[in-house]
Amino acid sequence: MQDTAFLHATDFILNQSTLKISQPNPAKFRNLGKINLNSKHMVLYSHIAQVLIALSIVIIWVFRFYKVEKEFKLYELSDLTRNMVGASKISLSTLLVAGIWYPDLVLVPALMMAALMMAAQYFHFKLKHPFLYHVPSLILLLMSLFIAAVSLKYI
């Protein structure tokens, strides 16, 4: 009786009596290592990202407004600019949440939010902030782009 051992790391079959190397059955390994996410999962993740962005914006622009005021003074931007950015972010966040029930609303607010987060990144670089200051707006930027991609059905 011949014993065969299957080595997962090399995907070769080794025969004990002779050193015979053969390729494994490709049908057996077709889905190995692939992430199987269908569009339903991606839409769900997009909805989660929409809610997370909205919650983040509300927490920052409503409950931690004193920090926003301090940052905009550092950037030497006017109060009018600060208020316009805040109103825009809160409006876009509202549209992102409404987009859970009305998907046609999602693309433009997601791209506009991404643009505002790019502007935030620009100002952080301009003032040479440490990387830790870049992280929140970078995460919101990536989530906004993810939402836009799902909305366009790229993912």
Image: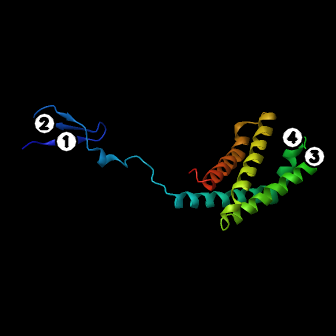
Q: How far apart are marks 1 and 2 (CA)?
A: 8 Å
Q: How crowded is mark 4: few (under 14 residues within 10 Å), some or many (20 or more)?
A: few
User: Are circles 3 and 1 on residues that touch, CB within 8 Å?
Assistant: no
Q: Of the residues under marks 1 and 4, which one precedes in the sequence?
A: 1
15 left or right of 113?
Answer: left
Q: How far apart are marks 3 and 2 (CA)?
A: 79 Å
Q: Judging from the image, what secondary structure is the residue with disc 3 in?
A: loop
Q: Quadrant of the N terminus?
A: top left
User: Are circles 3 and 4 on residues that touch, CB within 8 Å?
Assistant: no
What residue is pinned by disc 3? 78
Q: Of the residues under marks 3 and 1, which one precedes in the sequence?
A: 1
Q: What residue type is labelled 1?
A: Ala
Q: Residues within 10 Å of mark 3 (few under 14, many from 20)?
A: few
Q: Which amino acid does label 4 sit on?
A: Tyr
Give the residue drawn at x 83%, y 50%: 68
Can the viewer see residue 63 in this picture? no
Q: How far apart are marks 4 and 2 (CA)?
A: 72 Å
What residue is pinned by disc 1? 5
What residue is pinned by disc 4? 75
Q: Judging from the image, what secondary structure is the residue with disc 2 in?
A: loop
Q: Of the residues under marks 4 and 2, which one precedes in the sequence?
A: 2
Give the residue drawn at x 67%, y 59%: 50
- Asked where in the image residue 103 lies, by quadrant, the reply is bottom right
109 left or right of 11?
Answer: right
Can the viewer see residue 146 in this picture? yes
Q: What residue type is labelled 2?
A: Gln
Where does residue 42 sit, x and y in percent of width and height? 55, 57
User: Are circles 1 and 2 on residues that touch, CB within 8 Å?
Assistant: yes
Where does residue 129 sit, x and y in percent of width and height? 77, 36
Q: How far apart are marks 1 and 4 (CA)?
A: 66 Å
